[in-house]
Image (cartoon, coloured by chain):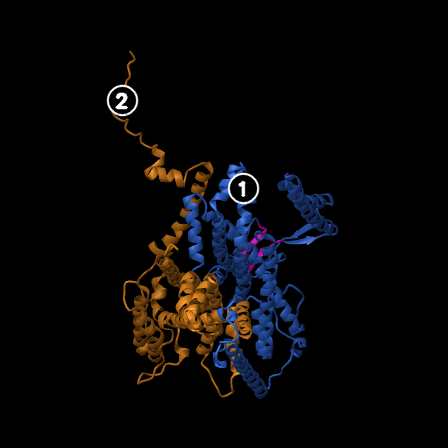
């Protein structure tokens, strides 16, 4: 008679190898999975430490944070006193000091509107958009420039971060609608409209922004009657708007092309006219698709506002650059540029992160 | 594109103002009239303004004597040269920095892009930091940083940094040995040309051979041997007919050798680093766009990893990479015009800057400058489109 033996209970599962779990597993997986990988890790790690330690030491540990004159900066570290002493001019440019509260109000309004528009949880987006597009520009213009009892401040006294933000906002707000119109025109069935839009878009996309700004400053006065004098800032703004609208048009067009023509045709079958079809059916879908492209264009526009320093407007970067030749503060160019880089980087990186956030929010999985 | 109303029968459209075709015609006629009157007004104003200010018109000024000096001239130029010559000099300088920038940006960009996909966590993160750092800082700021804060703050020529007493770097620029070809050097150049042509023919032959027989020649050895080995051999056999003019410190500055202006150096570094960040993203997205099944299929056919990369992944990734790369190259060429901010004598600085200030004929000069960039854009797009058409996916 055969006898059988059975286990009454399961053997407890073996633990995975130590090298596959926890910190050690992660290290093995990502840093030391083979000889080549380990060598790369050691090399990159050494390089990072070699480069990072002096930078951190210079920028944070040995840096001089408080003080009010050049004499306070004698150590090896960064001299942030240099930035602190000129922070006022970096933000407001040559705006009269007694009037700077007006800029502050515009800044506050700008931030409040921005939060209202950008944070999804805050209600009333339509009101915010209308206020942002119609009310805010007028209020901001009169606050910054003067009128209604406020002292007039000519645009040549505008400067610094304030000017950078003015140029960027006007460029962004102006170039998007113009770009949408151009993109629709480029896809029009009317040959003349299409031709004009193609030539317009390809012209601006083919030339550097700097030649556009040169054109705005040297050729524009020739185009208008002699006694007709347009503000230098306004000319630059028009140039920037036209230039970026061409790029915006191409981004929007790529979205329009991605929408099946059945969408527009279905709209037509329901009796919608052209603008209704575009405004209610096609554009809402197309614009949603190209949000990353639009934000990338905004970022590029924001970075390129620095070019106005070449035609003699004093934006944020221009003031930093002017600081490098200030005879009482020679030798602090690196501090100035690092600070400027940090400011621009925060704006641009923030915009790109926000666009990724919106993209995820709008993603519907179909 | 087929519009819904195109297919409607002619009758039943109702009155004329309801007819889309008629409305389109009226709209276009109005647009034409509007455009013509705006352009007419601009031309009228311009002519009147030019007349009032006593500015000449026409391109005669190109033959006049320029009389200013330019810090970097690739072809001979002196104070007696014409404005036409300054145009050519500026154009050549623009092309020089663009070409240098494109080469460097492509190399850095591919390296960083591939590093971002590395299984090594540290390397991938380092590449990510590079991309996020440099593409979010304005190019002009980077140019000014390299020029003012780094290169112009270098020590004077006497304390310059040197590499083996051959290459020197100081606040006046980069000094490198200049090659001086002796008699007989042209044999090596001819050998290089012949080798390249032979390599191209071999590659073509190899492709035909592969599609006929399925076998490949060991091209990894043959092409370097033809392109590099042949000229080097001819060079050595003909007695190394090349000497180097090494820069040497004489008085307050270096003489001899080849001088790279600090402006060119700063512009080159900034353009390359900035554009490379964008190219790295393009390379990464291109490689990631190839479905994983392609790698797995290649592995299933037991292709070795290198062949998988070279023959399966890269050709497919290139289809995504090429069109975007074209626009980055074009951006680099257009961005090189920022040279004018630091005084590198490119087309915009020399022609739309100095020449315009002297002559004052802004319309002609701006038109010529813009035309150059437009033509360059069209040329690069054309070349890239030809390449793109050759590598495009051929579907049924």
The chain that hosts pointer 1 is B
Give above or below for A186 relative to B279.
below
Q: Position of residue A35 (x, y in %)?
A: 46, 36
| In the foreground, A76 or B79 | B79
Q: Position of residue A143 (x, y in %)?
A: 33, 79
Q: Is residue B172 magenta?
A: yes
The structure residue drawn at horizontal position 30% and vertical position 74%, both measured from the top left corner, is A105
| In the foreground, A178 or A285 | A285
- Classify mark 2: helix, strand or loop: loop
Q: Colour of chain B?
A: blue
| In the foreground, B103 or B162 | B103
The chain that hosts pointer 2 is A
Q: Position of residue B274 (x, y in %)?
A: 48, 58
In this image, B92 relative to B122: left or right?
right
Q: Is residue A323 magenta?
A: no
Estimate how packed mark 1 is, as few (under 14), some (14 to 19) or many (20 or more) residues with alpha carbons within 10 Å. Answer: some
Task: Work out whether residue B144 can be spotted.
Answer: no
Residue at the extreme top of the image, as rendered: A1
Main secondary structure along the magenta-highlighted residues: strand
User: How far apart are the two marked residues, 2 and 1, measured between alpha carbons?
Assistant: 50 Å
In this image, B334 relative to A108: left or right?
right
Q: Which residue is mark 1?
A: B308
Bounds of the magenta span? B165-177
Q: Which residue is mark 2?
A: A7
The disc placed on residue A69 is: none
């Amino acid at each position: 008679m055969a006898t059988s033996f059975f286990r009454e209970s399961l053997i407890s599962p073996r633990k995975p190898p130590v090298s596959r779990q926890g910190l050690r597993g992660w290290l093995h997986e990502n840093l030391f999975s083979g000889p080549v990988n380990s060598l790369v890790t050691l090399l990159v790690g050494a390089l990072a430490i070699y480069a990072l330690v002096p930078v951190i030491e210079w920028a944070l540990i040995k840096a001089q944070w408080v003080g009010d004159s050049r004499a306070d900066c004698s150590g090896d570290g960064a001299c942030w006193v240099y930035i602190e002493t000129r922070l006022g001019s970096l933000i407001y440019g040559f705006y009269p000091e007694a009037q700077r509260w007006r800029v502050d109000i515009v800044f506050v309004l700008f931030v409040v509107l921005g939060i209202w528009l950008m944070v999804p949880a805050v209600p009333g987006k339509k009101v915010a958009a209308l206020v942002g597009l119609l009310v805010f520009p007028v209020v901001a213009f009169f606050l910054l420039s003067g009128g209604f009892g406020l002292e007039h401040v000519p645009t040549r006294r505008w400067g610094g971060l304030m000017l950078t933000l003015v140029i960027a906002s006007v460029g962004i707000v102006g170039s998007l609608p113009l770009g949408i119109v151009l993109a629709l025109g480029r896809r029009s069935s009317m040959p003349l409209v299409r031709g004009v839009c193609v030539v317009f878009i390809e012209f601006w996309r083919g030339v550097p922004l700097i030649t556009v700004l040169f054109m705005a400053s040297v050729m524009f006065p020739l185009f208008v009657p002699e006694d007709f004098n347009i503000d230098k800032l306004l000319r630059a703004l028009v140039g920037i708007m036209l230039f970026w609208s061409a790029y915006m048009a191409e981004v929007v067009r790529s979205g329009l092309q991605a929408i099946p023509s059945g969408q527009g045709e279905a709209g037509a079958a329901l009796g919608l006219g052209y603008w209704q079809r575009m405004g209610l059916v096609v554009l809402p879908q197309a614009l949603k698709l190209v949000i990353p492209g639009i934000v990338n264009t905004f970022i590029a526009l924001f970075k390129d506002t620095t070019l106005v320093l070449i035609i003699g407007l004093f934006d944020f970067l221009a003031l930093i650059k002017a600081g490098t030749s200030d005879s009482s503060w020679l030798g602090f160019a690196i501090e100035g540029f690092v600070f400027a880089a940090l400011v621009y980087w925060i704006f641009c990186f923030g915009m790109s992160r926000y666009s990724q956030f919106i993209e995820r929010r709008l993603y519907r999985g179909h | 594109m087929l519009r819904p109303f195109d297919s409607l029968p002619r009758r039943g459209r109702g009155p004329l103002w309801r007819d889309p075709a008629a409305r389109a015609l009226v709209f276009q006629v109005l647009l034409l009239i509007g455009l013509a009157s705006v352009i007419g007004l601009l031309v009228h104003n311009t002519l009147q303004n030019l007349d009032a200010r006593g500015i000449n018109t026409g391109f005669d000024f190109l033959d006049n004597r320029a009389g200013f000096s330019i810090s970097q001239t690739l072809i001979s130029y002196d104070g007696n040269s014409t404005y036409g010559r300054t145009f050519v000099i500026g154009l050549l300088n623009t092309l020089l920095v663009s070409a240098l920038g494109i080469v460097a940006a492509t190399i850095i960009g591919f390296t960083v892009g591939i590093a971002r996909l590395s299984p090594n966590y540290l390397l991938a993160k380092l590449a990510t930091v590079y991309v996020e750092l440099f593409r979010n800082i304005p190019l002009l700021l980077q140019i000014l940083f390299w020029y003012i804060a780094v290169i112009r703050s270098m020590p004077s020529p006497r304390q310059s940094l040197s590499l083996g007493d051959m290459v020197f770097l100081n606040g006046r620029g980069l000094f490198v040995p200049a090659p001086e070809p002796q008699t007989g050097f042209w044999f090596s150049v001819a050998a290089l040309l012949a080798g390249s042509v032979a390599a191209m023919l071999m590659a073509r032959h190899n492709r035909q051979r592969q599609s006929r027989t399925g076998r490949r020649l060991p091209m990894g050895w043959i092409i370097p041997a033809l392109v590099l080995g042949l000229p080097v051999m001819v060079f050595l056999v003909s007695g190394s007919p090349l000497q180097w003019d090494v820069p040497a410190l004489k008085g307050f500055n270096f003489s001899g050798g080849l001088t790279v202006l600090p402006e060119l150096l700063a512009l080159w570094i900034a353009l390359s680093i900035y554009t490379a960040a964008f190219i790295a993203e393009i390379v990464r997205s291109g490689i990631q766009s190839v479905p994983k099944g392609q790698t797995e299929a290649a592995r299933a056919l037991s292709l070795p990893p290198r062949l998988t990369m070279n023959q399966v992944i890269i050709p497919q990734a290139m289809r995504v990479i090429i069109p975007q790369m074209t626009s980055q190259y074009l951006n680099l060429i257009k961005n090189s015009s920022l040279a004018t901010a630091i005084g590198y004598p490119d087309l915009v600085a020399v022609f739309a800057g100095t020449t315009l200030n002297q002559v004052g004929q802004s319309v002609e000069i701006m038109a010529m400058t813009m035309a150059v960039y437009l033509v360059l854009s069209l040329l690069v797009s054309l070349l890239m489109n030809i390449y793109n058409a050759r590598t495009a996916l051929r579907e049924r």
